[in-house]
């Protein structure tokens, strides 16, 4: 384990890095990344190192470099950039000697602190402390504070400014733009994206103090896409501390909290905001920031785990931290990206990761955010209609990868090299990984039943559910021979099987989608005639319902075999079985592709990730415990967990199957995807869905929380390592506090109310007034 | 001095680096850069370091990122890229211990060799030797050879391939393109520039040997703009040597030696060429390469200096080396860039640096190349006409910065920050630094008189000289009050004086240009009626001559004052005189701008570089020795030599003035611009003009070679440190060998001929038949 809890009072809040190695840079940059949903900042160091990856992303500011490339989140200017020359020698941890090193992310304060005692190659010693945060209270603000205490009288020179030369793996998304210095101190850089025409305004200003504030000797410089100060001749007496604060702001013309018509207005507004920020100062900004985090996350949806291993508590807080950092809660035109805002991986695009892995966290803890994320899908219906039309279908066919609302499909077409042909492999997901559409429908339905948000359903939900069902009804293919509707030539959740027929997950969830739509059409006609009429105009409900009813019973649903195994698709079970030991024991995911190309993998009984198993998690009522166990035993040994979406799902299912120790093992493995000893896993960014999955492993798994058929179930079952688990969930607009220990569970309704609440606890329906206590029972 | 001669037999051919420091990276990358005029390759290491600058430029492949940015040479894919994992640890000189380090550029072989003995942080020891060259025999070929000898049994993993993510300071000039693997080994990446639509084809292939050749375990990978192999599990027994050769080729659709209509044709041709290259193997390619260098440079235009300091010999060979590396001799649509092909500085643009500083080297040693460079100017006449028209003038107004032939002016409009206003400073050179036009005319005239190349004159030279004179004749402004033509609001060579009136250099060379044009119009009418007629159609010679004759006597030429000082312009001598000691003693050029902005510098008697002095070098007949001395004494103390063009000019002039020791000092200082102890001077690229200037300091300065009024003068005068100087020059199609020692000079005509040759030697005209020997005399 290279990331551990810190020491001292807040240790279960501290993610600490063991030491400095250049080969670990990418990992630390991602794991320690900061943000506030508006923007995300990779935690590079102030000074540069080889193979570092400096990234600043602003949610929803997509751009496309050229026609044959895909829309992506552009890497914005680097405002962290500072280089220090101490007594003539560049501060560089690869040179000289590191006498002390500590880098710690304080999750509670969302602050990154690096403490270094460095001996330069010349033998001089310096204590340096670097602090920074991206304000949760003011979404546009990045603040750094650097303290330098030389052990001998020293002279500092420093370069610091704004570097707009950033690219996405070499792709420049910004025009040259303008630079200017204001007030003799305040640097401004304005840039505009090349294709989407989004204006960005970056500002930075420094403040120096050494026994009182002062202004060192400096010269302002400009280079291509860069504005920066060269400071020089800063004398620091031995043992005294020089403090440098750098206040930076980021604004764009897409911001929904900024009223600006022109780039000049935006620039002026940002300029003045930066002046205000600097005037307020570090302490005041930091206090507001900490309070905002507490309100939004820590006191809002606390999870407390008493475990043999403090790491478990840290892991779930780490997940909550990053989910808050990556979620653009401020703007329903944006969604969560597969790597959050912490790396270039997956280009800032949104996948089913949101609906199936991340959304449950928000649905159960912060419905407002869940609703905003679902509204994003509603707002992107035009793109989904477009995609359906292009493919010859009706209704809403959601893009596998989604970026700006009206982009439609943005999945890249070409991927990794084919080791056999030498050509790039075609990525089929954008064409035929179609289950995303029912995933979105399912998430909206789940949101509605957990929150009871009728306004959402009236405005967006019913339409989403019916429009997606319309897609499926048009997508079905009639098989005359078998007298059934099939869904052929798809990719299911298991992306190691391309062009398969009747993927169980796809067929079952499509069936569910149409079935649910029928219920809602009926309900609307019966109970909400006005809404029915409005949607009828849009969706032609009469014809749609007729079609739904016609196809529903004729949709082919793969059936469980005698041995309990549900075929993943029409051919999976007939494919070759090989010894997968080597790949199951792999150090790095994807090791099988050293030996096989995708075409060959396609012909082997091997899965990338949960497929049948995730179906049995989402639509759990359709399958018995025995069937679930049989499928676990069949598929898990053939699943390489090459997707980070796989382990947490398996953990929840292991909890469901009553194997808490296996579930715990899987929870730990899922937690180690980002926090574990493999230092290369997170280079391209954090594993957003896995973090949502970690929360699910705790609350839906060990906490035993589930909504089925509109009913709530809470049946906690802890692993041996845990003494107790406390968490809170939202249920239809009230908060339930759950305290599970090894023997007992206490469920408390936070707000006193007269209306009784029915919850299934360990298989029994219980009516709860204020609080309910139960022994822990095996299910 | 951080660069010294090497050791051993070839020591006067070896530029050796003292040690490895990350802060020296930029210097070494430039100083050691390789190339062949077709392409230039910065000498980054195989493995990556922070703040490195990986550059590969192909001459003449200009592209423009966006409308408001300027045309520049795009940074092409990195084929040098190799990363080594030795026993699980990344090979990285900033980690572990460097037990031995040697990096040496062998100028004779144009080969870069790095020898390292490295102890990893784990204590294991490895001997590594890295060799590479960019073939002078086959312009498209880059070859690397890496030898690894572990002191213990070791396992190597390696990543190596083609990285097309390169940018110019963040600006991406290429579309995504295509990648493919051929033959299971041969990597291909095709890219096209975004605006100019130039196709690039990159290919790389590896060859491994360890007691015989073998193919290690590998997997081919593709990422955005990248194709590369991951090799693993390469076992090397203790003390055995693994050798890896990487053969890479670069082709573009602009290549004039390649016949391809489509990108596919280009790709196929390049693919097959790479297969051939690999089949030929390292030794064979290297031998051809060394021979090509010998033919082109070392046996063609040798210079031998016997000096107290071996550095002097090295410095002039270093200059010749880089001039060969940077000069696109193969294609007259291209010219030399101000930083050669060794860095992004000045964007690959061509300045007056070519004509005034570099061209004399070629004119006197390799007229074919000189002619090609002049033809470039002739071919870019359409751009010069365009620029004249846009500015309301006639004739050929050459761009201050020149890129592709028909681009016209490409000088960027905005430069460094103004420390007073905070805004970017406007760069006026592109608008009003107009002397470039007479510089080109002068160089063509010089070329003609040195080489006697009548064919050049007939086809290009007369037209150039008359067309440029037409520009000047239209550019002149009539001053009614003084009854004279003036040239107002210009920038002269001294760029610290903007918007000056009657810059002496500009007025005198414009006058010379018109005067010379009159002579040639007369001559054509008299002696070459057909050519006269052809040019008359193009240039309206009758009207032009009339205008020339009308203006010539009325052009205001600033006159030498009583004290011998020639006013640099109308106002220079009236400006404030301040104590410049601080800036004359500066460590880095441009230090004055820490205290003053350009507007303030404009009002002080301070010069960036030679201005009046370079006039007195080019048109030396117009000024007496006393006047030259008076102006030296007035202007040199006010000249900061902030341009690298300044020191070598001053060295030649000091030689002319008979102060050989001062000349030597200036020669050394000029040599140290790139090879000296300031490790930051060359980051943006080599100082092309300064290198041409070093040759001039030797041959035109100490060698006393000059063409004036069509006559040759050879009057060597060595500094004390030198015992002898040998060099060869071209004079009207024959080669003269000059051997000067402290007391005697011997001039030998290499090819026996009956026609006598008249040369001025130490003030006397001498008729030389075969050889001529003279005592060294003071002039």
Image: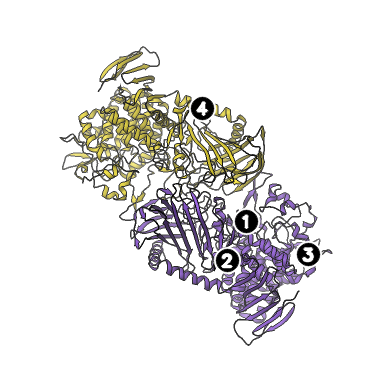
Chain colours: A purple, B yellow
Mark 1 falls on what kind of element? loop
First in sequence, mark 2 or 3: give its number. 2
Mark 2 falls on what kind of element? helix
Marking on residue A323: 2
Residue at the spot of label 4 = B290
In space, the residues marked 4 and 3 are separated at their CA atoms by 75 Å
Mark 3 falls on what kind of element? strand
Residue at the spot of label 1 = A677
Of tags 2 and 3, the one toward the viewer is: 2
In space, the residues marked 4 and 1 are separated at their CA atoms by 50 Å
Residue at left offset 67%, top offset 59%: A433
Find the residue positioned furthest to the right.
Answer: A562
In this rendering, does residue B542 appear at all?
no
- How packed mark 1 is, by other alpha carbons closer than 10 Å (few <14, some 14-19, many 20 or more), is few
Left or right of A225? Residue A454 is: right
**In x, y percent, where is residue A235?**
36, 54
- How packed mark 4 is, by other alpha carbons closer than 10 Å (few <14, some 14-19, many 20 or more), is many
Left or right of A118? Residue A604 is: right
Q: Are marks 4 and 1 in contact (CB under 8 Å)?
A: no
In space, the residues marked 4 and 2 are separated at their CA atoms by 60 Å
Q: Is residue A465 above or below residue B233?
A: below
């Amino acid at each position: 384990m290279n990331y551990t809890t810190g020491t001292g009072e807040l240790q279960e809040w501290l993610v600490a890095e063991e030491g400095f190695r250049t080969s670990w840079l990418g990992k630390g940059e991602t794991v320690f990344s900061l943000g506030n949903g508006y923007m995300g900042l990779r935690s590079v160091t102030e000074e540069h190192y080889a193979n570092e990856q400096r990234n600043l992303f602003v949610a929803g500011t997509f751009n496309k470099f050229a026609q044959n490339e895909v829309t992506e989140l552009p890497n914005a200017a680097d405002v962290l950039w500072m280089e220090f020359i101490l007594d003539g020698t560049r501060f560089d941890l690869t040179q000289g000697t590191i006498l002390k090193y500590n880098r710690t992310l304080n999750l509670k304060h969302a602050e990154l602190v690096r403490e270094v005692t460095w001996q330069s190659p010349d033998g001089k010693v310096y204590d340096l402390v670097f602090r920074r945060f991206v304000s949760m209270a003011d979404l546009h603000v990045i603040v750094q504070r650097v303290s330098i205490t030389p052990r001998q009288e020293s002279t500092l020179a420093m370069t610091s400014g704004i570097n707009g030369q950033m690219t996405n793996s070499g792709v420049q998304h910004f025009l040259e733009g303008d630079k200017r210095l204001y007030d003799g101190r305040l640097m401004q850089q304005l840039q505009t994206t090349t294709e989407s025409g989004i204006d960005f305004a970056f500002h930075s200003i420094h403040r120096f103090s050494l026994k009182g504030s002062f202004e060192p000797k400096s010269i302002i410089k400009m280079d291509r896409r860069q504005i920066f100060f060269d400071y020089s001749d800063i004398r620091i007496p031995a043992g005294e501390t020089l403090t440098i604060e750098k206040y930076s702001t980021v604004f764009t013309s897409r911001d929904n909290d900024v009223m600006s018509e022109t780039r000049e207005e935006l620039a002026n507004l940002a300029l003045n905001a930066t002046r205000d920020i600097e005037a307020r100062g570090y302490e005041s900004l930091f206090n507001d920031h900490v309070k905002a985090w507490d309100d939004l996350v820590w006191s809002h949806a606390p999870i407390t785990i008493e475990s043999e291993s403090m790491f478990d508590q840290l892991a779930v807080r780490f997940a909550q931290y990053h989910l808050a950092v990556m979620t653009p809660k401020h703007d329903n035109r944006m969604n969560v990206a597969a790597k959050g805002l912490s790396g270039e991986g997956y280009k800032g695009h949104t996948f089913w990761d949101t609906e199936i892995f991340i959304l449950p966290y928000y649905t159960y803890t912060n419905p407002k955010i869940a609703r905003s994320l679902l509204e994003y899908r509603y707002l992107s219906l035009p793109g989904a209609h477009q995609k359906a039309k292009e493919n010859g279908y009706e209704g809403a066919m959601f893009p596998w990868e989604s970026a700006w609302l009206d982009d439609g499909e943005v999945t890249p077409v070409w991927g990794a090299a084919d080791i056999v042909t030498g050509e790039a492999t075609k990525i089929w997901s954008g064409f035929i990984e179609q289950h995303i559409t029912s995933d979105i429908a399912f998430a909206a339905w789940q949101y509605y039943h957990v929150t009871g948000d009728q306004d959402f359903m009236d405005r967006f939900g019913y339409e989403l559910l019916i429009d997606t069902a319309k897609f499926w009804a048009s997508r079905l293919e009639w098989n005359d021979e078998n007298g059934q509707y099939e869904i052929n030539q798809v990719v299911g959740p298991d992306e190691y099987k391309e062009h398969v027929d009747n993927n169980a997950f796809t067929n079952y969830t499509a069936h569910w989608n149409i079935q649910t739509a029928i219920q809602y059409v009926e309900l609307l006609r019966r109970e909400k005639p006005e809404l029915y009429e409005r949607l009828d105009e849009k969706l032609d409900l009469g014809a749609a319902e007729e079609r739904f009813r016609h196809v529903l019973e004729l949709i082919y649903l793969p059936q469980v075999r005698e041995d309990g195994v549900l075929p993943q698709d029409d051919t999976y079970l007939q494919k070759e079985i090989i010894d997968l030991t080597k790949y199951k024991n792999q150090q790095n995911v994807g090791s099988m592709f050293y030996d096989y190309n995708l075409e060959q993998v396609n012909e082997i009984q091997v899965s990338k990730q949960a497929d049948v198993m995730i179906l049995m998690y989402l639509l759990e009522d359709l399958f018995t415990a025995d069937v679930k166990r049989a499928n676990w035993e069949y598929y898990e040994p053939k699943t390489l967990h090459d997707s980070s979406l796989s382990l947490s799902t398996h953990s929840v299912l292991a909890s469901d199957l009553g194997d808490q120790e296996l579930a715990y093992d899987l929870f730990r493995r899922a937690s180690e995807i980002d926090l574990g000893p493999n230092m290369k896993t997170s280079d391209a960014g954090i594993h957003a869905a896995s973090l949502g999955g970690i929360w699910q492993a705790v609350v839906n798994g060990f906490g035993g929380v589930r909504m089925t058929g509109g009913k709530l179930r809470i049946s906690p079952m802890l692993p041996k390592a845990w003494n107790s688990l406390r968490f809170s969930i939202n249920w239809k607009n009230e908060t339930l506090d759950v305290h599970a220990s090894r023997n007992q569970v206490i469920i408390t309704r936070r707000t006193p109310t007269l209306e009784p609440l029915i919850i299934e606890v360990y298989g029994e329906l219980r009516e709860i007034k204020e609080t309910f206590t139960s022994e822990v029972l095996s299910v």
